[in-house]
Amino acid sequence: MSVALSAYLTLLGFSGQRIGLMVTCMLLGSAAVTLTVGLRGNALGRRRLLRLGSVVMIVTGLVYASTTQFIVLLIVGTIGTMNPTSGDVSAFQPVEQALVAATTVDERRTAMFARYAFVGTAAAALGSLAAGLPEWVAGIADIADDTALRLVFVVYALAGVAVLVVYSGLSARVEPPAAQPAAPLNESRRIVLRLAAVFSLDAFGGGFVVQSILALWLFRRFDLSVAAAGALLFWTGLFSALSSFLSARIARRIGLIRTMVFTHMPAQVFLIGAAFMPNVWLAIGCLLARSLMSAMDVPARNSYVMAVVSPRERAAAASVTNVPRSLAAALPPVAAGWMLDRSTFGWPLLLAGVIKLVYDLIVLMMFRNIRPPEEQRSSSR
């Protein structure tokens, strides 16, 4: 979806600035829904929330498949579930993260989040690869490219149906115990707000290179086709997915915070390098190298957040730490689209890399001495 979205909106005649605005509104809408679910969704129950999100996903896909009016697409993109990034920013996220953390002991929590990240990232990579199918269908069936790309949104709606079926099969055991009902932030408020603040800086930098913007840069800088861009993003996504398994192993040796920082910094150097590459192959090399390290911090970050808050506040913590990320990432796509309207140089990549390096240094200074329970027990032995 994140690959096809830019190509589809470009074929409809929308400028880079308008595409950036669409991405911004999608991120803002996702942030609002995610925050509401994390803080106020307890009364509805986890199963009902997940099923409701699935229905909204279906409706979003059907609307995008049936209209080309910018204002309609903008409104539905804002209140729907469509995600212009390669990660998961949605109403599903706070509920799912709380469930993942509840299924295992502290010592296995990071490994469980690594599996969770691997499945999601690998599936997203396959989606990027499949983004070239509409172009192939258009050639075989002799139909317009924009018509073929609309089929992507039909598939998105069908995926919503599949998600609804999966969530409908969950048993009552996914609901929190009556003795430990989910709660809004209280005792964990201070550290969660500090984490949310620094995560927002990372997301602000990442907003310049969300998947849809990165695809747009590839289209304009190197004149890549949708299929070629999708294939590249498939490999970067696959490398990121595979690297997530290393996160748990590294964390056992050096700790969660150092894992987050020391795997994240080299990735940003390669991102900055990609902006300066004179040809597509060198740029691809930098992006692939970046993908080998860029996602290792995700399981460590999610595990760390779940570790330093009380079990009752996990859903709220997941929401509060992820929503500011969406808000911070919402403004840069407009600026990135404006930049790409005026120059094909990778200014968005350069800005993203520098901002993310600053974030890494701040995280290390602020949280290196705040350790999760399993690290405290290990050091006391």
Image (cartoon, grey):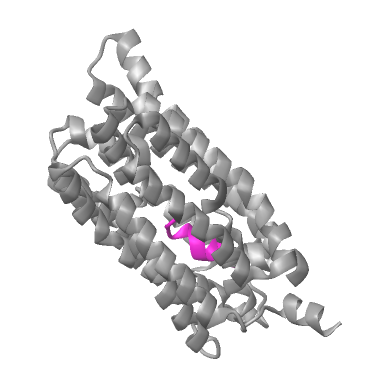
Q: Is residue 92 magenta?
A: yes
Name the residue furthest bottom.
Answer: 187
- Residue visible at 70% across and 60% down? 250
Q: Is residue 127 left or right of residue 172?
A: left
- Please provide percent x and percent y for residue 251: 69, 64
Viewer-proximal residue among 55 and 250: 250
Q: Is 263 in front, or is 187?
A: 263
Towards the viewer: 195 or 36: 195
Q: Which secondary structure class fits the magenta region best?
A: helix
Kindly give the residue lying farthest to the right in the view shown. 381
Q: Is residue 183 visible?
A: no
Q: Quick one: quadrant of the C terminus?
A: bottom right
Give above or below for 167 relative to 251. Answer: above
Residue 288: say if magenta.
no
- What is the quadrant of residue 131 in the picture? top left
Q: Is residue 354 left or right of residue 256?
A: left
Instruction: Give the residue displayed 36% in from the left and 64% down from the top.
Output: 355
Residue 372 horizontal/vertical position (percent) = 67, 78
Residue 344: quadrant of the picture: top left
Magenta stretch bounds: 89-98
Query: What x and y, as percent, mark residue 86?
Result: 43, 47
In the displayed structure, 299 sits above or below 363; it is above
- The residue under the point 52% across, 80% down is 365
